[in-house]
Amino acid sequence: MPFPLEQVPLFLAVLDTGSFSAAARKLGKVPSAISMAIGQLEAELGLQLFDRTGREPTPTAAAQALEPQARLLAQQLQQLNQQALALHAG
């Protein structure tokens, strides 16, 4: 299954903050929505991205392997949006 584009910021927020709660605060969502979205992403990909056995979710080897491309994609999307805004502004 493909990695849904709209899930990239959520995935990176969990990696960056280290918890579903902190990612939820960063994204303006409730923690349960983040947890459910990551669970759905894991189901779609057929991969476990975070180990939930501890107090906070720990990235698995799969998450660590996907992280560089997710960061690159997020950066490219940000650049695309900035260029579109600049073109709009004239």
Image (cartoon, rainbow, N blue to C red):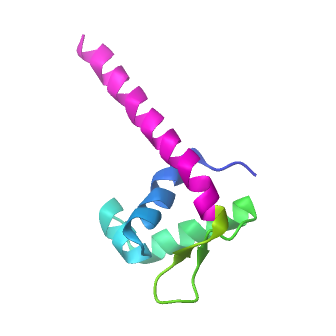
Instruction: Tell me, yes or no, if residue 9 can be seen here.
Output: yes
The residue depicted at 72 percent of the width and 59 percent of the height is 45
Asked if residue 60 lies in the magenta stretch, the reply is no
Q: Position of residue 64 (x, y in %)?
A: 59, 61
Reply above or below: 67 against 60: above
Q: Can you say whether 60 is above or below 90 in the image?
A: below
Instruction: Decide whether the magenta segment is chiefly helix, strand or loop.
Output: helix
Q: Is residue 73 magenta?
A: yes
Task: Provide residue 84's location: percent of width, then percent of height.
Answer: 36, 21
Can see residue 41? no
Q: Outermost residue, top direction?
A: 90
**Which quadrant of the view contains residue 79?**
top left
Label tally: 0
**In this rendering, is residue 15 above or below 30?**
above
Seen at 50% across and 41% down, the residue is 72
- In the picture, measured across the screen, residue 14 lies left or right of residue 85, that is right
* Residue span colored magenta: 63-90
Most extreme residue toward the bottom is 54
Give how far across and how far down residue 58 sits, in percent.
53, 77
Q: Nearer the viewer, residue 84 or 60?
A: 60
49 sits to left or right of 27:
right
Nearest the viewer among 44 and 66 is 66
Q: Residue at x 55, y 54 (%)?
A: 67
Residue drawn 45% across the image and 53% down it = 9
- Left or right: residue 81 versus residue 49 is left
Return the x and y of residue 62 as percentages of the image width and height: 66, 63
Q: Quadrant of the C terminus?
A: top left
